[in-house]
Image: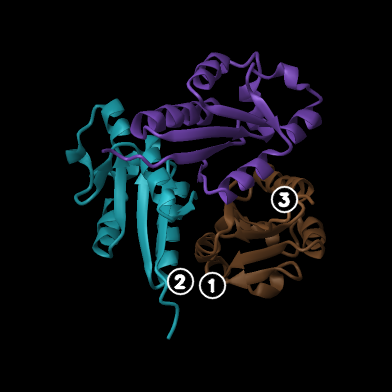
Chain colours: A brown, B purple, C cyan
Amino acid sequence: MGDERIYRVVFHLDEDDDERVLLLFANVRNLMADIQNVEIEVVAYSKGVSAFLRDSEYSDRICKLIDDGVRFAACSNTLNAWGITSGKLVDGVDTVSSGVGEIVRKQAEGWAYIRP
Amino acid sequence: MGDERIYRVVFHLDEDDDERVLLLFANVRNLMADIQNVEIEVVAYSKGVSAFLRDSEYSDRICKLIDDGVRFAACSNTLNAWGITSGKLVDGVDTVSSGVGEIVRKQAEGWAYIRP
Amino acid sequence: MGDERIYRVVFHLDEDDDERVLLLFANVRNLMADIQNVEIEVVAYSKGVSAFLRDSEYSDRICKLIDDGVRFAACSNTLNAWGITSGKLVDGVDTVSSGVGEIVRKQAEGWAYIRP
């Protein structure tokens, strides 16, 4: 019984102000509480990548969400432009060739898109 | 003759600044004028819910749009977090378990997504 | 060999602050570099249309992107509301009945949607 469908959702983060980043984390948690069978990826590019850095104030939240099965992906173009290596990212955060390309590929595979 | 296709669109509102809220209402009206067979739902969560409250300056606009067949849905998580009941919402505004989940479900059913 | 799939992406611009407009142009360029077979349309409405005007600081960027096959579409509702003619747009920028309707039609045809 219940809704057996699997939902897949890509979140888009390209800003770094606290309110927007915290809203995104709340979105992810609320979505996980609301829909049982959900696969979530959070893609950051531009300023959004700063939230994924090891020394960001959000690193604990990200670690916990990774433990809970959420995927985090940072844009390599942004990392290269900033001159920082992927080693600066929170453990478990992946890199993708481009954040925008990743979001496009996910939507092309049928994923829903949320831009908080 | 003409385009018999039915279009379905979910709008996402999570901000409360006047410019953004008014842009969303203009979007809805422009969309209804441009595409005849369109089903529209406006989903609000976080600060976006304040526009849907009975005492908001947008309540008349919302009433008219509901009369014209637009559905408005407010996030229960937000209402609970704010400690306000659904009775504070404009008459005819629905509540959903979570705003983000509602947007995801609509997209999974093939609805287009607009985030003004 | 390689990914022969064609990706189609509609970008949404409704703001005019430099940071957002420049991010959109960087997005388009990064997407073109990341995905070879990509068809891109940038739709502007409301304040976003100002970036598409002939005398905007972005006109050269737009010309080059049009040369590279990107389509730009400005909302006629916005132009009418501003009392300006399509002749004020950068050469090669198209007009559409409404920006929001254009984005909806593209998504209904299976295009991915990016709102930077």
Give the residue number, with chain letter if any, for mark 3. A28
Relative vertical location of residue B89 with respect to residue A34 in this rendering, above or below: above
Query: Which residue is at 74% across, 67% downward?
Result: A90
Amino acid beneath label 2: Asp
Q: In the rendering, at what x and y percent does residue C84 appear?
A: 23, 31
**Residue A114 seen in the current view:** no
Q: Residue furthest left?
A: C87
| Label 1 residue SS | loop
- Mark 3 and mark 1: span between their CA atoms? 23 Å
Packing grade of label 1 (10 A; few <14, some 14-19, many >=20) is some
Query: Which residue is at 21% across, 51% downward?
Result: C92
Q: In the rendering, at what x and y percent does residue A87 appear?
A: 70, 74
Do callouts 1 and 2 point to residues on the same chain? Answer: no
Q: Are marks 3 and 1 in contact (CB under 8 Å)?
A: no
On-image quarter of the N terminus of chain C: bottom left
Chain under callout 2 = C
Give the residue number, with chain letter if any, for mark 1. A97
Amino acid beneath label 3: Val
Q: Are marks 1 and 2 in contact (CB under 8 Å)?
A: yes
Give the residue number, with chain letter if any, for mark 2. C34
Residue A45 is left or right of residue A63, and the answer is left
- Mark 2 and mark 3: span between their CA atoms? 27 Å
Chain under callout 1 = A
Residue A25: which numbered mark, if any?
A: none
Residue A86 is left or right of residue C22, and the answer is right
Q: Nearer the viewer, mark 3 or mark 1?
A: 3
